[in-house]
Image (cartoon, grey):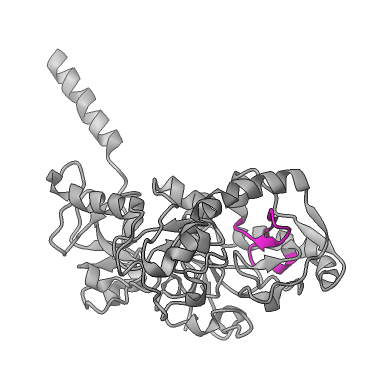
Amino acid sequence: MARSFVALVAFAAIAIAAPSPITPDPNGANKVGNGQGLQFITGGCLSTADCSQAVVQSCCAFIAGGSSTGICSGIDVGNVNGKAGCGFGDGGSSTDSSAPAASSPPAAAVTSSTTNSSGSSAQCAVDTSLAGSQNVGTGSGTQFITGQCLSAADCASGCCVAQASGPALCKAQLVTEQAGLTCDFSCSGSTSSATSSSSDTAVSQPATNVAATASGGSSTGSCPAIDTTLAGSQNVGTGSGTQFITGQCFTAADCASGCCVLQSDGISLCKAELVTTQAGLTCDSSCTGGAASSASSSSSSASTSPNSNNGSSTGSAVTGAAGSAQCTVNTSLAGSQNVGKGSGQQFITGQCFSSADCASGCCVQQASGTALCKAQLVTTQAGLSCDFTCAA
């Protein structure tokens, strides 16, 4: 009787500990097994050859508990959230506790590439085919999230993350740290020598910004000059809500995220709202005078719109009607050339017709009629859905 009770308790513990299985997104079923590298993140795969490598380095990950197919995943998160490590169909093996322990090398490879500060030749070469290549290696802190970097000094987020193969990419610091990764990649190649000395400064910059924002309040006083060297400078002070994350802003009304955060250098930048508030900062930086005056009148309404917009995307997948604003490319937005192609090249805050457009694999409906690419972790933590689809 005692043995039966012990066995029952052990069985119950195993059942409780078993992870909930994940299911590949059925919208990408036509991309499974063709080896063309077109499958977006969360889509099914039979090998890494199926998964898109545009902007984000991905792999075909095992599904915990076993499955006849893998799931395309970012390499740096291939062993979390129901996934059991990269290598499905590539000769690797699962990190699932029920599988052989031979799968530890992929995890080790990810860790070593993430913490490696020297960088390989591929990581030290600027990929001019990627958006924002003009910002790589300058150490100016102007590179947007998912753009290539040679050190954290390149990134507006102050976070440069090594990939298992290909170039290092700028990432959101909070998302990176929550995934157990580091932001301090530095390339030792000749092209990165100019940025190496400023790498430490850039990594510490977010902490500086925290202090500046917390002490400076929500207003910067008179508006600084628009920095026309930054991408998206045409969106500053318009109050149109079209500025992407890391772009300059005069008020929250400029930002697609509805979040304008004061920086220590006196220039405010658009940031992700959830990441900002979790860091104890505020999204309501504003300035007066100059081009900002027209934006100020609409600041209060525009800054609240992301919350109401995102609220409409909760629950099941949302589908836009053909011919609606949701299915019309807004050519005034940066990255409009990437909309509707399903190539996984669209950056965060860029317009999308489905998650297949987004490098993050996350397309979120907005109440304004335009769906935007968002960070998957931030979106799901906010209880929203990444699976908006525009009906053709």
> Residue 331: within the magenta?
no
**Occupied quadrant, residue 35:** bottom left
Can the viewer see residue 353?
no
Image side of residue 211 versus residue 203, left or right = right
Pinpoint residue 334: horizontal percent, then vertical percent: 58, 79
The dominant secondary structure in magenta is loop
Q: Looking at the picture, tell me which residue is in the foreground, 371 or 238.
A: 238
Q: Looking at the picture, tell me which residue is in the foreground, 134 or 255.
A: 134
Can the viewer see residue 263?
yes
Q: Looking at the picture, tell me which residue is in the foreground, 339 or 113.
A: 113
Q: Looking at the picture, tell me which residue is in the foreground, 238 or 128.
A: 128
Image side of residue 309 versus residue 108, left or right = right
Pinpoint residue 389: horizontal percent, then vertical percent: 47, 73
Quadrant for the N terminus in the image: top left
Q: How many marks?
A: 0
Where does the magenta region start and end? 253-272
> Residue 261: within the magenta?
yes
Residue 163 versus residue 324 in the image, above or below: above
**Occupied quadrant, residue 236:** bottom right
Pinpoint residue 229: horizontal percent, then vertical percent: 64, 75
Pinpoint residue 219: horizontal percent, then vertical percent: 80, 54
Image side of residue 123 versus residue 245, left or right = left
| Residue at screen point 20% across, 67% down | 47
| Residue at screen point 43% across, 83% down | 341
